[in-house]
Image (spheres, rainbow, N blue to C red):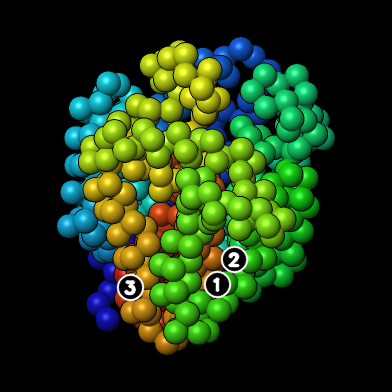
């Protein structure tokens, strides 16, 4: 093997900077620059609220610049925004439908941010010098996130626990949300943290892994997120079956996602199916989401090809102030509570098809290409758990192309992780360092 092309001290400095960038990017998504949001103000009803502040823009661009620089200097630079044959047409279509919408400024800005997140995620796993460093840094960042969340619950309860004085959803009073804007986003983050805890137990430290797992599960139980709480053990079991039983992989992914959406969104428009679900003692409205889904299907039927544009349907002045609340409260919904339906509303059925190819079909093929020695490792298991959880969680929450969502970011980097694992070979630590690091094999 050839010698490194830069002196060891320079390479160590480079790894130090890369590790710092890894930590900064991780905490940016785990905690954000605006934690502990006050939900009692009138601004929660303002459709124009939520614009980024100057500091957030500066940090976002700074992190992105650092990611680009590291990505272009890395030996595996070809992975940036790969596969381009799929992603370039996908983002071009998203930009086109957004530019043609009634709010092009919102849509185009949102898609550019989503593109930046995709590039960040594609380089993210190239930042650590080894898997050991990845496990240590990831575990440490999650512990910091948990510390911030518990600090909020203990010392800032009015900003970390849902209050009855909140204007949008006072019925959530008493549920923990920590530094997150909503109990559901907190619940999803705690599920991810639990996966990291299981991984850290095997790849880094049993003590740290156990601490992460216990703290995240306890917090999850207090969020009131029933779906997330049920999906945590379910995802672990499904991921184990996915790993051990190849014959079940296609039914789990393709059949499972289709069935999950049929039983949720489909039940909103198919009355016999709704009655069947109710007969099992399950809330067939899925916490009143059914009204939103019926309304969304009606709207999609009007623009099935191009949709309405990104961020140009829910919470727009045209919808909120249309007077449609007389017919259904769904016009006031913050989103469609289903990622697949929301991307169809934003970019039509072509946008949905391209998204499914990227997020579901392609990773399934990558997993099938894994070498036997990489298929049962803790790292591959972590990527698989995140990928499966996000894929199924998308059936009840909106997360696709959301720039500030830790679940969306983790979803994408897990897909790139499976891609790296599918081409990885076991190497000695020195050889890994000489070749530029990165979390693979």
Which label's residue is closer to the chain start, 3 or 2? 2
The residue shown at (69%, 60%) is: 280
Q: In which quadrant will I find the N terminus?
A: bottom left
Hey, which residue is sitting farthest front in the picture?
Answer: 272
For the residues labelled 1 and 2, the Cα–Cα distance comes to 6 Å
Decide if residue 66 is on the left or right side of residue 104.
right
Mark 1 crowdedness (10 Å alpha carbons): few <14, some 14-19, many ≥20: many
User: Does the CB distance between marks 1 and 2 fall below 8 Å?
Assistant: yes
The residue that label 3 is drawn on is 365
Q: Position of residue 251 (x, y in %)?
A: 44, 74
The residue shown at (48%, 24%) is: 331
Mark 3 crowdedness (10 Å alpha carbons): few <14, some 14-19, many ≥20: some
SS of the residue at dot 2?
helix
The residue that label 1 is drawn on is 239
Which label's residue is closer to the chain start, 1 or 3? 1
For the residues labelled 3 and 2, the Cα–Cα distance comes to 20 Å
Q: Nearer the viewer, residue 345 or 355?
A: 345
Q: Position of residue 341 (x, y in %)?
A: 41, 44
Which label is found at residue 235? 2
User: Does the CB distance between marks 3 and 2 fall below 8 Å?
Assistant: no
Hey, which residue is sitting farthest bottom in the picture?
Answer: 372
Q: Position of residue 306 (x, y in %)?
A: 23, 37
């Amino acid at each position: 093997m050839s010698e490194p092309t830069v002196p060891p001290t320079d390479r160590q400095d480079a790894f130090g900077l890369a590790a710092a960038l890894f930590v900064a990017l991780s905490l940016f998504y785990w905690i954000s620059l605006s934690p502990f949001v006050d939900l009692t103000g009138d601004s929660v009803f303002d459709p124009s609220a939520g614009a980024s502040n100057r500091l957030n823009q500066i940090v976002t661009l700074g992190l992105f610049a650092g990611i680009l620089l590291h990505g272009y200097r890395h030996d595996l630079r070809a992975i940036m925004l790969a596969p381009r044959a799929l992603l370039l047409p996908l983002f071009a279509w998203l930009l086109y439908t957004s530019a043609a919408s009634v709010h092009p400024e919102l849509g185009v800005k949102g898609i550019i941010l989503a593109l930046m997140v995709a590039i960040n995620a594609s380089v993210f796993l190239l930042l650590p010098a080894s898997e050991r460093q990845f496990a240590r840094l990831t575990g440490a960042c999650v512990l910091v996130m948990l510390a911030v969340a518990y600090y909020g619950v203990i010392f800032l309860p009015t900003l970390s626990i849902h209050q009855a004085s909140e204007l949008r959803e006072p019925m959530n009073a008493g549920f923990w949300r920590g530094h997150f804007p909503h109990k559901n986003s907190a619940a999803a983050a705690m599920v991810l943290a639990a996966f990291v805890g299981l991984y850290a137990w095997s790849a880094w430290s049993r003590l740290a892994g156990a601490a992460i797992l216990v703290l995240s599960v306890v917090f999850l139980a207090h969020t009131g997120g029933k779906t997330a709480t049920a999906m945590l053990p379910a995802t672990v079991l499904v991921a184990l079956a996915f790993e051990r039983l190849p014959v079940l992989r296609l039914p789990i992914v393709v059949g499972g996602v289709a069935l999950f959406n049929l039983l949720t969104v489909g039940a909103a428009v198919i009355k016999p199916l709704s009655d069947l679900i109710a007969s099992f003692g399950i809330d067939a409205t899925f916490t009143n989401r059914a009204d939103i889904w019926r309304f969304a299907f009606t709207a999609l039927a009007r623009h099935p090809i191009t949709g309405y544009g990104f961020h140009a349907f829910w919470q727009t002045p045209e919808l909120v102030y249309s007077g449609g609340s007389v017919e259904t409260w769904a016009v006031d919904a913050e989103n469609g509570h289903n990622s697949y339906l929301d991307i169809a509303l934003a970019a039509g059925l072509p946008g949905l098809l391209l998204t499914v190819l990227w997020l579901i079909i392609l990773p399934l093929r990558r997993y099938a290409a894994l070498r036997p020695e990489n298929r049962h490792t803790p790292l591959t298991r972590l990527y698989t758990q995140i990928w499966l959880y996000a894929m199924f969680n998308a059936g009840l929450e909106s997360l696709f192309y959301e720039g500030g969502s830790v679940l969306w970011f983790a979803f994408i980097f897990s897909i790139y992780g499976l891609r790296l694992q599918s081409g990885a070979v076991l190497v000695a630590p020195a050889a890994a360092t000489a070749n530029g690091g990165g979390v693979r094999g």
